Image: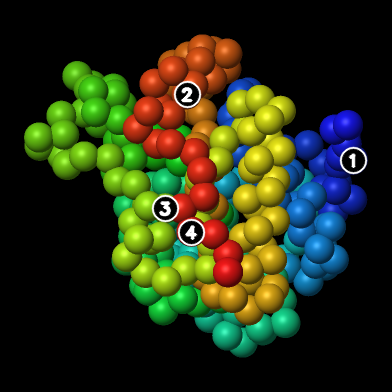
Amino acid sequence: MRVIKEKPAIIENAHNFCAGCSHGTFYRLIQECVEELGYAHRQIIALGVGCNCNLSLSGIDHIDKFQCAHGRAAASATGIKRMRPDLLVMTYQGDGDCGVIGLSETLNAAYRNEKITVFTVNNLNFGMTGGQMSWTTMEGQKTATCLMGRDCEKTGYPIHLPELIATQFRPAYVARCAVYDSKNVEQARRCIRNALEAQIKGEGYSMVELLGVCPTNWGMSPLKAEERLKTEILKEYPLGEFKTRG
């Protein structure tokens, strides 16, 4: 029988993400797992620049957060964790912050196997700044900076960050998940918990990429955005664990 989770006590107010956005569900799942692991008041989140900035602006909770310069969350989290190894230290970033502006910081932290956990929401565009093309944007996808659709012969092809980190470095845990139905919500919770436990047990670097939807910048209703995710985007970005613990 599926257990219905109560809202984590640490989350006090409603978020202000756009209707249908995946950020709210993903962040709640993170805090459910943090609470279960006993770290609700022993965590620090290094926030990237993007829609995730809402977590510091909306007053959704009173968790310690550090607003980083664009793309520098992994470097900031590294410094925090080295100074306070007793805390659960996470980054929370979008694909533009984690895999474009901050690609160097992200890869260097993974290369050194820093004992931090990176959470990144991949919604195929720079969401907060108007929907510009990201390195994760699909071939042919229209954005604010490729109005005719992405031409990969000119701009390069979509980057697959979890697969890159899992195969080229020696992280503790790497996965990609989604939250478009109850089955995948439960799988995402398991991935998040595994990533956090890998840090708590000192196993090394962990990353979970959430494949999210962005109805506002995609110009779709939430239902149509989810349908696009299931029928089109999953072909490019398959879900699963790319590096398992142990």
The residue type indicated by label 1 comes to: Glu
Q: Is residue 44 visible?
A: no
Q: Earlier in the sequence, mark 1 or mark 3?
A: 1
Colour style of the rendered protein structure: rainbow
Q: Which residue is mark 3?
A: 162
Q: Earlier in the sequence, mark 4 or mark 2?
A: 2
The quarter of the rendered structure image containing the C terminus is bottom right
Question: Residue 6 got which mark?
Answer: 1
Disc 1 from disc 2: Cα separation: 27 Å
Nearest the viewer among 154 and 207 is: 207
Name the front one of labels 4 and 2.
Answer: 4
Residue at x 51%, y 15% (from the top left corner): 227
Name the front one of labels 4 and 3.
Answer: 4
Q: Earlier in the sequence, mark 1 or mark 2?
A: 1
Q: Which residue is mark 2?
A: 229
Q: Earlier in the sequence, mark 3 or mark 2?
A: 3
Q: Secondary structure at mark 2?
A: helix
Disc 4 from disc 2: Cα separation: 23 Å
Q: Secondary structure at mark 3?
A: helix
Residue at x 53%, y 68% (from the top left corner): 172
Kindly indicate whether the residue at mark 3 contacts the one at mark 4 (C-beta within 8 angstroms). no
Q: Earlier in the sequence, mark 1 or mark 4?
A: 1
Q: Which residue is mark 4?
A: 243
Residue at x 39%, y 21% (from the top left corner): 232
Q: Position of residue 162 (x, y in %)?
A: 42, 53
Farthest residue toward the front?
Answer: 246
